[in-house]
């Protein structure tokens, strides 16, 4: 599905933007499902927040169990000092994760199929395995920053294979917290894995592996402003970041993290699957490539 020019650009830059990958109808379907999931979510079940600033401290049972569930996480500043939500629940959720693609039929349809499988093959995934899905709201006004990181920190394989599929469900701009990346930052002397997030039992740690500095916005990083429907596919070593959303509009996105089954998936990765929900590829049901 990719042209040879696109393949060369992906190898050089570590990412590729594919406009209009998803239709308005496909996006409307997952947006409606996300809304229904949040509507049905009872905050009494969990008031877990998601923040990249204190990722180790905020990991709890609810987070670990979300590997095989559909779980809602609040924005860091969703709650006031009195413990009550500052704004409506529907405007307070940071993300839903992490098994939407396996457990919800609408997200399953969105997350699989020949187009995605062909793209995965073109970016070098010979036997794709979809470990994680996240619906990210980036809520207006309170949408949290996601600090500079590499996705291989969370999905370690030998050799590194994790690839991210980032679907814009709304227009993403500098104002509402679009992705920033460092073109080419996945290769050469800067293409080193800086951190590894490890799980040992119910404990997690963030270990520094390399002190190579993160990119600096405006210097060696660029914003990826994309329209709703675009798919950004990027390499697991590519540094990326997104700013807080202080604008009045949300920035919904949906992501998949995919590794290659022909590599070794680290047993210390936080996200593991048991026999009740084995990891799957990008083709399901009657799909053929
Ligand atoms: Fe990421």
Image: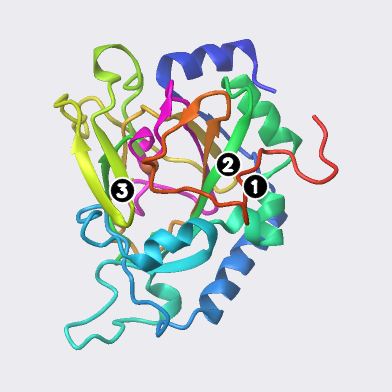
Looking at the image, tell me whether mark 3 or mark 2 is earlier in sequence order.
Answer: 2
Q: Which segment is the magenta one?
A: 151-179
Image-quarter location of ligand 1? top left
Quadrant location, the C terminus: top right
Q: In front: mark 1 or mark 3?
A: 3
Please give the name of the residue rendered at 63% of the width and 22% of the height, measured from the top-left corner: 126
Residue picked out by circle 2: 130
Nearer to the camera, 276 or 90: 276
Residue picked out by circle 1: 111
Q: In front: mark 2 or mark 1?
A: 2
Q: In x, y percent, where is residue 204? A: 27, 51
- Do residues under tags 1 and 3 come within 8 Å of each other at their CB atoms? no
Q: Residues within 10 Å of mark 3 (few under 14, many from 20)?
A: few
Nearer to the camera, 184 or 129: 129
Q: In x, y percent, where is residue 230? A: 57, 41
Residue picked out by circle 3: 200
Please tell me whether residue 169 is drawn above or below residue 116 in the rendered image.
below
Disc 1 element: helix
- Residue at disc 1, CB closer than 8 Å to ligand 1: no
Quadrant of the image occupied by residue 117: top right
Q: In front: mark 3 or mark 2?
A: 3
| Inter-mark Cα distance, 3 to 2 | 22 Å
Q: In x, y percent, where is residue 247? A: 32, 61
| Inter-mark Cα distance, 2 to 1 | 9 Å
Disc 2 element: strand
The number of numbered discs placed on residues in the rendered structure image is: 3
Q: Residues within 10 Å of mark 2 (few under 14, many from 20)?
A: many
Q: In x, y percent, where is residue 20? A: 63, 40
Quadrant of the image occupied by residue 239: top left
């Amino acid at each position: 599905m990719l042209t040879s020019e696109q393949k060369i650009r992906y190898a050089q830059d570590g990412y590729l933007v594919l406009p209009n990958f998803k239709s308005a109808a496909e996006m409307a379907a997952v947006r409606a499902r996300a809304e229904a999931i949040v509507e049905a979510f009872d905050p009494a079940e969990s008031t877990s927040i998601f923040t990249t600033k204190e990722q180790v401290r905020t990991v709890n049972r609810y987070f670990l169990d979300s590997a095989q569930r559909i779980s809602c996480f609040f924005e860091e500043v969703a709650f006031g000092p009195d413990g009550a939500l500052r704004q409506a629940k529907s405007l307070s959720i940071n993300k839903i994760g992490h098994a939407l693609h396996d457990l919800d039929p609408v997200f399953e349809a969105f997350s699989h199929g020949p187009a995605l499988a062909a793209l995965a093959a073109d970016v070098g995934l010979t036997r794709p395995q979809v470990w994680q899905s996240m619906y990210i709201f980036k809520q207006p006004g309170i949408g949290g920053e996601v600090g500079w990181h590499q996705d291989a920190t969370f999905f370690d394989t030998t050799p590194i294979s994790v690839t991210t599929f980032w679907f814009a469900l709304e227009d993403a701009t500098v104002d509402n917290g679009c992705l920033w990346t460092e073109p080419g930052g996945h290769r050469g002397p800067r293409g080193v894995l800086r951190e590894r997030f490890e799980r040992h039992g119910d404990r997690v740690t963030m270990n520094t592996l390399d002190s190579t500095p993160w990119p600096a916005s405006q210097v060696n990083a660029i914003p990826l402003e994309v329209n709703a429907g675009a798919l950004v596919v990027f390499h697991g070593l590519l540094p990326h970041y997104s700013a807080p959303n202080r604008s009045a509009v949300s920035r919904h996105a949906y992501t998949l993290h995919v590794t290659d089954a022909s590599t070794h998936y680290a047993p210390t990765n936080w996200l593991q699957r048991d026999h009740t929900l084995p990891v799957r590829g990008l083709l399901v049901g009657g799909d053929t490539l």
